[in-house]
Image (spheres, helix red, strand yellow):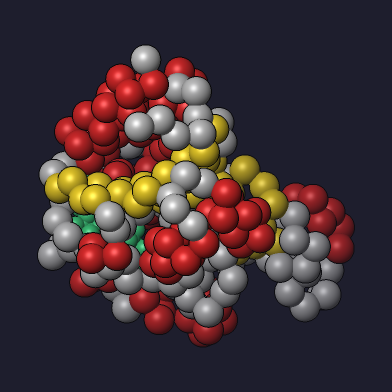
Amino acid sequence: MTFRSIVVLTGAGISAESGLGTFRDADGLWTKYDLAEVATPEGFARNPAFVHEFYNARRRNLLGAAPNAAHAALAHLEAHGPARVTIVTQNVDSLHERAGSRNVIPMHGELLKVRCHAAEHVLDWPDDVSVETRCPRCGDAARGPAGRLGYLRPHVVWFGEMPFAMEPIGALLGACDLFVSIGTSGNVYPAAGFVDEVRGIGAAHTVELNLEPSDGASRFAEAIYGPATKVVPAFVERLLRADA
Ligand code: OAD
């Protein structure tokens, strides 16, 4: 069966074999940290230094990681298959882009970027951030006593905030004929509801690729279980063979 428009939703599981931890597995980040403290606007307002330290550590960890065979397979599919492929990722690690995927929507933001409170400048930022770090684009105003002007925050979406690009994502879900969900536990909305959106709209095929059945597993027409570096390249090869 050939497809013309493929939407791939990815989560932390696709980067697990790159050495980046997931959130809800046995040793996941949310077993070690209280997400209310480090992943909400209220937590940041209460203790910005602690939140910066959390993201600094994740940023340093990310700088030592590389894309794996699953990221590479999706980049290959986009470059060599006839279908339009869009990756909508909940990951903030930019590993899809580094693997060569061009059509990527990082709906939960990007760890290697920061933005300032006031002017919403978004900046590439591979370095540590502290409560003292000021937005270089806000210039002199950032050094004045102007409240929070020029203060930086991670360019990631926190709980209670709206993910990025929801409108274009909705349009893509409505137009796709294949929806593939990879390495996500199906706990966090709106991403966890994408499969229902796709099913509600039309006849698109839906597939889950994950280490184990996710919370939403029964909502997919097809499921393949195993580590992403094995099942994703095999699935991509199957798609490309069908197109040949
Ligand atoms: P989770 O940690 O909730 O789920 C990771 C999923 O990946 C689980 O279902 C695992 O079984 C699976 N998995 C683990 N290792 C794998 C491997 N090698 N190959 C394939 N699958 C594997 O992570 P997400 O679903 O991405 O949001 O979490 C969603 C959101 O919750 C994140 O974007 C983040 C988090 O809180 C925010 O911080 C806003």
Query: Where on the image, by quarter, is ligand 1?
Result: bottom left
Compared to residue 84, the image places residue 143 above or below, namely: below
Compared to residue 8, the image places residue 47 above or below, namely: below
Quadrant of the image occupied by residue 233: top left
Q: How many marks?
A: 0
Viewer can see residue 209: yes
- Who's the residue at 45% across and 18% down the image? 80
Quadrant showing the C terminus:
top left
Residue 17 point in image, percent of width and height: 21, 40
- Who's the residue at 14% across and 56% down the image? 212
- The foreground one among 130 and 74 is 74
- Who's the residue at 33% across and 28% down the image? 239
Residue 141 point in image, percent of width and height: 86, 63
- The foreground one among 19 and 234 is 234
- Who's the residue at 79% across and 50% down the image? 137
Compared to residue 112, the image places residue 147 above or below, namely: below
